[in-house]
């Protein structure tokens, strides 16, 4: 059990259709997507995909060469990530960034729970391409079975999403930790309006003890992002895959100084993003 964390911001994810492996942007070699949006993703939505090896497959690969090509390419360091899990068993398959010069590989030891795998590569001199691969180099064969995938990323390492790791437990206020029916008035083209009714999810908490220094700085940076309307992923336990994507609901959240060396942020209200 770990304290919560928040991930937010970041630059461009160079991959297209990062959770739609059935899209033609993803090349499927010796396999096919047998369950598009058939698997519950780490954020609880039915958006993860199942990829199943073809009969007698000896080298299953799922890959994407992003278009447009990231620029600058040569000399840039990239971080690739994806959420992966096995449909059954504990296969180990490759996860890597490839280019026309070489590759950096991580061996992804899968089980039936979601894990997020990460690989880093610097594009060397002479590189004219880049791709993110799952499988490959004869690491995934038919007998290892289907693999579920979600949330692929390829970022410049310099602008990967920021992480706010909670140093203390947050104090929940259960009255607001509820799902509620929400009525939104959607204006379109002047006078015409329609009402969208949906089940919404809220979260409110106080963070009463924030240490001066790096922790307060991390909270300030996060609030700057959230107050500007930015979305963020909230992990109730930093060690577990479950997450919810929220936006900040109240615009009066700010750091306040409690005692010398100690800050607090109170009444943070999050609303599930749609
Ligand atoms: Ca999907």
Image (cartoon, rainbow, N blue to C red):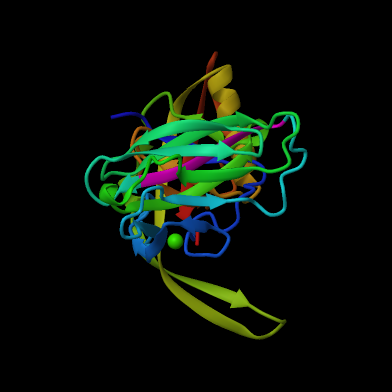
> Depth check: 234 or 126 in front?
126
Tell me if residue 216 comes above or below residue 13 in the rendering.
above
Please state the horizontal and vertical placement of residue 264, each as a whole percent of the image.
50, 28
Residue 270 seen in render: no
Q: How many marks?
A: 0
Please state the horizontal and vertical placement of residue 6, each as a whole percent of the image.
48, 38
> Depth check: 102 or 3 in front?
102
Confirm whether the magenta stretch covers residue 66.
no
Please state the horizontal and vertical placement of residue 65, each as a whole percent of the image.
62, 50
The picture quadrant where one finds residue 129 is: top right
Residue visible at 43% across and 23% down in the picture: 167
> Depth check: 112 or 167 in front?
112
Q: Which residues are magenta?
A: 76-84
Tell me if residue 49 comes above or below residue 240 in the rendering.
below
What is the quadrant of the N terminus in the image?
top left
Residue 115 seen in render: yes
Residue visible at 61% across and 82% down in the picture: 193
Q: Main secondary structure of the magenta part?
A: strand
Please state the horizontal and vertical placement of residue 165, each as a whole percent of the image.
46, 29
Residue that sits furthest to the bottom in the current view: 192
Residue visible at 67% across and 31% down in the picture: 158
Tell me if residue 10 comes above or below residue 220 in the rendering.
below
Residue 23 falls left or right of residue 140 = right
Residue 44 falls left or right of residue 117 = left
Residue that sits furthest to the left in the current view: 89
Residue that sits furthest to the top in the current view: 260
Which quadrant of the frame does ligand 1 lie within? bottom left
Residue visible at 44% across and 34% down in the picture: 5
Residue 251 falls left or right of residue 95 = right
Confirm whether the magenta stretch covers residue 82.
yes
């Amino acid at each position: 059990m770990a304290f919560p964390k928040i991930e937010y911001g970041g630059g461009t994810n160079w991959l297209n259709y990062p959770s739609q492996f059935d899209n033609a942007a993803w090349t499927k070699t010796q396999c096919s997507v047998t369950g598009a949006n058939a698997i519950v993703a780490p954020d609880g939505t039915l958006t993860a995909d199942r990829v199943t090896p073809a009969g007698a497959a000896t080298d299953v690969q799922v890959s994407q060469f992003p278009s447009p090509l990231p620029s600058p390419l040569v000399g840039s360091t990239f971080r690739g990530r994806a959420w992966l899990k096995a449909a059954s068993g504990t296969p180990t398959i490759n996860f890597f960034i490839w280019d026309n010069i070489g590759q950096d590989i991580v061996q992804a030891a899968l089980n039936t729970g979601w894990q997020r795998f990460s690989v880093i590569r610097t594009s060397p001199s002479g590189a004219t391409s880049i791709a993110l691969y799952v499988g490959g180099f004869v690491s995934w064969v038919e007998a290892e079975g289907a693999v579920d995938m979600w949330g692929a990323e390829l970022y410049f390492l310099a602008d990967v999403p920021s992480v706010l790791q909670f140093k203390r437990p947050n104090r929940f206020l259960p009255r607001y930790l509820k799902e509620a029916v929400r009525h939104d008035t959607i204006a379109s083209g002047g006078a015409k309006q329609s009402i969208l009714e949906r089940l919404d999810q809220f979260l409110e908490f106080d963070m009463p003890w924030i240490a001066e220094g790096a922790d307060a700085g991390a909270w300030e940076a996060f609030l700057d992002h959230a107050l500007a309307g930015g979305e963020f992923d909230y992990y109730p336990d930093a060690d577990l895959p479950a997450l919810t994507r929220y936006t900040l609901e109240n615009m009066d959240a700010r750091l306040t100084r409690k005692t010398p060396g100690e800050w607090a942020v109170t009444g943070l209200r999050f609303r599930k993003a749609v």
